[in-house]
Image (cartoon, rainbow, N blue to C red):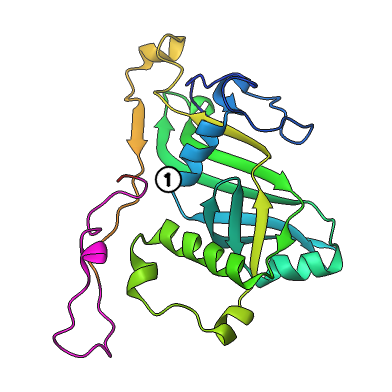
Amino acid sequence: MIANGSRPLGRPGEGNGVEITERTRLRRMRENGSHRREDLDAVLGAGFLCHLGVVVDGSPMVVPTVYGVDGDVIYVHGSVASRSLAQAPDGVVCLTVTHVDGLVLARSVFEHGVNYRCAMIYGVPRIVTDPDEKLRGLRVLTERSTPGQWEYARQPSRKELAATSLVALDLTEASVKIASGPPDDGDSPDAELGLWAGVLPVVTRFGALVADPALPAGIEPPAHLADRAGQVLGEA
């Protein structure tokens, strides 16, 4: 299967862009790529789960973790990244965020693909040690996944804060790719095969809340949680 789509994004340098380096230079399917900050913000704003690629004990490791964005900084939760930084303080990491929007089902397997939105961010991260910044970073991380939960739940104690690993990475070296649309073989000889072709959408939706079995009777969920049931991830 190959990636599909023909949605043109802004050219590098258009608008408020991010740094273009040899790591983020778009070489393949450049018409689907962008270095515009607004495109990066849109991909990051549509989710809360990322994959962080680091080198630990000499071996590459890709770790799923949650993130939150505050201005030009993305915060990620994870002790693995902290271990990596302890071994190589100047080591570069790669952070990716991907959303799958649909399977592109063409008339031939060769033309099958995936509609997606993805961002790739490179840089030398830093371990957040300042208590105020760590608290702020954990807040944006929590609010990214569950808006309203930071003020509703008990916030971290000093002991819990000290035991939490938080890593910060600047949003200065990044690229975005987006693929969308129908199959590309509608005007090919395969169109005469009489086979169905199109897109099978993929949607991530929040389900109904499931209460903790230990929850005493009479405690109802707050509105900021109850209202999310049925919502599509990434939609307001």
Range shown magenta: 210-234
Q: Residue at x 47, y 55 (%)?
A: 48
Q: Secondary structure at mark 1?
A: loop
Q: Specify whether 52 is left or right of 47.
A: right
Question: Relative to 174, does residue 9 appear above or below in the rendering?
Answer: above
Most extreme residue toward the left, as rendered?
218
Residue 88 placement: quadrant: bottom right
Residue 181 image offset from top left, x and y in percent: 40, 24
- Residue closest to the eye, 77 or 57: 77
Q: Residue at x 29, y 83 (%)?
A: 212
Q: Residue at x 25, y 58 (%)?
A: 228
| Residue tagged 1 | 46
Report the quarter where the N terminus lies.
Answer: top right
Residue 83 placement: quadrant: bottom right
Residue 119 placement: quadrant: top right
Q: Specify whether 177 is left or right of 228.
A: right
Q: Is residue 163 visible?
A: no
Residue 6 image offset from top left, x and y in percent: 49, 20
Question: Relative to 227, does residue 212 appear above or below in the rendering?
Answer: below
Q: Specify whether 38 is left or right of 187.
A: right
Name the main secondary structure of what is drawn in magenta.
loop
